[in-house]
Amino acid sequence: MSNKQSDIGLIGLAVMGENLVLNMESKGFSVSVYNRTAAVTEKFADGRAKGKNIISTKTLEDFVGSLAHPRKAMIMVKAGAPVDAVIDQLVPLLEQGDIIIDGGNSLWTDTQRREKDLKKKGLRYVGAGVSGGEEGALNGPSIMPGGSEEAWKSVGPIFRKIAAIVEGEPCCRHMGPDGAGHYVKMIHNGIEYGDMQLICEAYAILKTAINPSAEEFHQIFAEWNKGELNSYLIDITEQIFTKQDEETGKPLVDLILDKAGQKGTGKWTVGNAVEHAVVLSTVNAAVEARILSSMKDKRVAASKILPTVEVKPFAGDRQQFINDVRDALYASKIVSYAQGLDLLATAGKFYNWNLNFGDIATIWRGGCIIRAAFLNRIKEAYEANPNLENLMLAPFFTEVFVKSQAGWRRAICAAVERGVAVPAFTASLGYYDSYRSACLPANLLQAQRDFFGAHTYERLDKPAGEFFHTNWTGQGGATASTTYTA
Ligand code: NBP
């Protein structure tokens, strides 16, 4: 072991860890590494780390001993119990003021708990969401760190240097205290679920109605990528349609089993939205679509029993239809972001995180999976009005709905007529139509509640706060209507 002290250390040399280490080293930082299975460390040392400013260690004692003070130890292992296991082993080796960073996809409440526990021991804790996968980790991810301002001062300069850069600005800013960074990362992942499902639904509508070839799909997505939908996910979708299976010569996408996997951040996001009574219908539809997709055997069996619809041959203007689907995708995407940001705002207030939406949109513009041109518009919307009630109400986005809503509705009608499931499109439009409605049928709902449960109701023609109960059946001898004041 050399006596040299590294700027930072990283524990966990799987896909993300290895690439983050190489990224840090390439930006001029010296890095120590440790992995539970020593053979992995050895392979890295003899392979990609060879000749680089990277110190490989075989024990956590050597790892900690190789770090410059205050020590910065970044954990990049599987989320959950493994993170606690590593922390438990690290803590006895560290000193007051040292910093532990968890860069995995940890649940934000775990991060809050860990930060609180470690603070009592004089250690600083940073829960940092890292997005961008393998390629982002190597060349510049989007990083969402949470934790104390003091800890941020120590790790910020390293993180901002390794993050993706968009228009000269690193895609890394301090998100807020304790679990704020991991919470923002979770919302990022939820939005990612929504974006991916919306793209898949656009594909499904087009396929059923006008059946483009893989080459045509490639061209459609390439065209969309030049406009307002310009994004990483549209870009990779465009590329997917160009890949041919070597064995059969067919488009590979047509040979892939339609069963989607998921790791859990989507479900966490939806569960938390329910807890905070925030509507997250697009992401919810996306999570449920993955669940339904995984039930392949049941779907195949049901497809032989449940009646289908007779599909009419497409008779309209093909290009107009493609444009309608594009408009539906863009409008639904805006709704999904509006919902995700609403949840961020609600949770931010609940936890006193003081989240800055301009900052969040800024660091999502590059490095991460949801990076997209339209995040610039979101950034501008929050810069113009930091207290924006709902993204849909920002003048730029309201104008998008003016232009796109006819096509949005036509595309959904076309899907429904053909029996194509578009749960994320319909959930988005349902939210839009509910949110913009001054009147909803909840008058009838309140009447039902009062009928069976005497839950009372307010009236349109009386002051708010005055509650009424009606004897709906006239039985039981009670008066027809009773007034209660809150
Ligand atoms: P994995 O999530 O596959 O975890 C593998 C690493 O965890 C290995 O280094 C393994 O060591 C280590 N590990 C495990 Br498993 N249990 C351990 C324990 N009890 N003690 C110590 N080490 C343990 O790695 P990854 O895909 O690189 O992801 C790392 C984190 O980053 C995760 O939280 C993930 O959700 C998040 N993330 C991943 C991506 C991605 O694209 N993969 C993107 C963004 C964020 P071993 O070699 O000894 O088994």
Image (cartoon, rainbow, N blue to C red):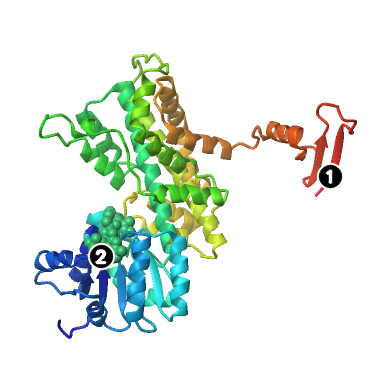
Pick the residue in front: 26 or 218: 26
What crowding class fits label 1: few (fewer than 14 Cα within 10 Å), some (14-19), or many (20 or more)? few
What crowding class fits label 2: few (fewer than 14 Cα within 10 Å), some (14-19), or many (20 or more)? many
User: Which quadrant would the N terminus be assigned to in this image?
Assistant: bottom left
Q: Quadrant of residue 27?
A: bottom left
Pick the residue in front: 92 or 307: 92
- In the image, residue 167 above or below residue 332: below
Q: Which residue is mark 1?
A: 484
Q: Position of residue 251 (x, y in %)?
A: 18, 31
* Label 2 C-beta lies within 8 Å of the nearest ligand 1 atom: yes
Q: Which residue is mark 2?
A: 12
Q: Amino acid at mark 2?
A: Gly
Q: Please state which of the two labelled residues, at mark 1 or mark 2, is closer to the viewer.
A: 2
Element under label 1?
A: strand
* Label 1 C-beta lies within 8 Å of the nearest ligand 1 atom: no
- In the image, residue 314 above or below residue 469: above
The reply to whether residue 292 is visible in this rendering is yes
Q: Amino acid at mark 1?
A: Tyr
Q: Is residue 257 left or right of residue 182?
A: left
Label 1 or label 2, whichever comes before in sequence order: 2
Q: Position of residue 72 (x, y in %)?
A: 31, 76
Disc 1 from disc 2: Cα separation: 62 Å
Q: Is residue 254 left or right of residue 152?
A: left
Element under label 2?
A: loop
Q: Quadrant of residue 217?
A: top left
Pick the residue in front: 65 or 403: 65
Q: Position of residue 326 (x, y in %)?
A: 36, 34
Q: Is residue 467 left or right of residue 281?
A: right
